[in-house]
Image (tube, rainbow, N blue to C red):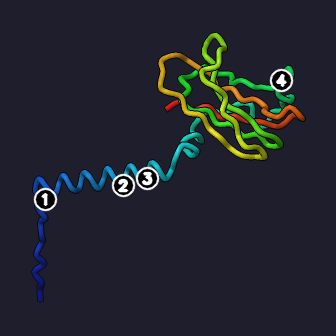
Amino acid sequence: MSRHVSSRVFVIGRRGMVCLAALTSAAALYLGMAVGPVSNAAAGEPFCSSVWVAPYGQPGDRCTAGTWIWVEEVLVQAYEHSGCADAVDVYYNLVQSWICTPGNNQFTFFFFPPNTIPRKGIVRNNATGGGTHIGGIQVSY
């Protein structure tokens, strides 16, 4: 005894293709937002991992990445006190104003507009009362 299995072919018209494209784009955007910048930073370049830095305003209160890249994001994590992130240009001028964590093992990140000038991430202690362990990640997309 044999069975005949019919095969169905679905034809999607122009409206169906537009709808499918819109749904695919929305799903990609949602997944990109759900993943977010922190997980993208995992593909970034860590620098100054758990380095001890002096209190703010004293020599040795900051740490700079070793590699020049087209930095678009810098993350900082300070363990005992508040830490700040920024980037420096090839003349070691700060690219923007510092952005700082609220402190105590918290992450914060700083986005920079895309640029064709190489930059380095820089992190510093934000507490005047004591040193802290600090670390950073610089990211170029």
Q: Amino acid at mark 1?
A: Ile
Q: Disc 3 on helix, strand or loop?
A: helix
Residue at which label 1 appears = 12
The picture places residue 27, in percent across and down from the top left corner, at: 36, 54
Q: Nearer the viewer, mark 1 or mark 4?
A: 4
Q: Nearer the viewer, residue 120 or 85?
A: 85
Between 45 and 87, the one nearer to me in the picture: 87
Closer to us: mark 4 or mark 3? Answer: 4
Q: Nearer the viewer, mark 2 or mark 4?
A: 4
Q: Earlier in the sequence, mark 1 or mark 3?
A: 1
Percent position of residue 126, x then y: 78, 33
Image coords of residue 32 (percent x, y): 44, 48
Q: Which amino acid type is shown beneath numbered disc 3?
A: Leu
* Circle 1 residues within 10 Å: few <14, some 14–19, many ≥20: few
Within the image, what quadrant is residue 10 found in?
bottom left
For the residues labelled 1 and 4, the Cα–Cα distance comes to 66 Å
Mark closest to the chain's N terminus, 2 or 4: 2
Q: Which residue appears at 68% of the width and 43% of the height?
A: 107
- Give, as a three-letter code, the residue at label 2: Ala
Picture layout, residue 123 above or below residue 82: above
Q: Which residue is mark 2?
A: 27
Q: Of the residues shown, which amino acid type is indicated by label 4?
A: Gly
Callout 4: SS: loop
SS at circle 1: loop
Bin the neighbour count of mark 4 within 10 Å (Cα to Cα): few under 14, some 14-19, many 20 and up.
few
- Indicate the quadrant containing the N terminus: top left, top right, bottom left or bottom right: bottom left
Q: Nearer the viewer, mark 1 or mark 2?
A: 2
Nearer the observer: mark 1 or 3; the answer is 3
Marks 2 and 4, how far apart in space? 47 Å
Give the residue pinned by disc 4.
57
- Mark 3, other Cα within 10 Å: few <14 / some 14–19 / many ≥20: few
Check disc 3 and report the residue beneath it: 31
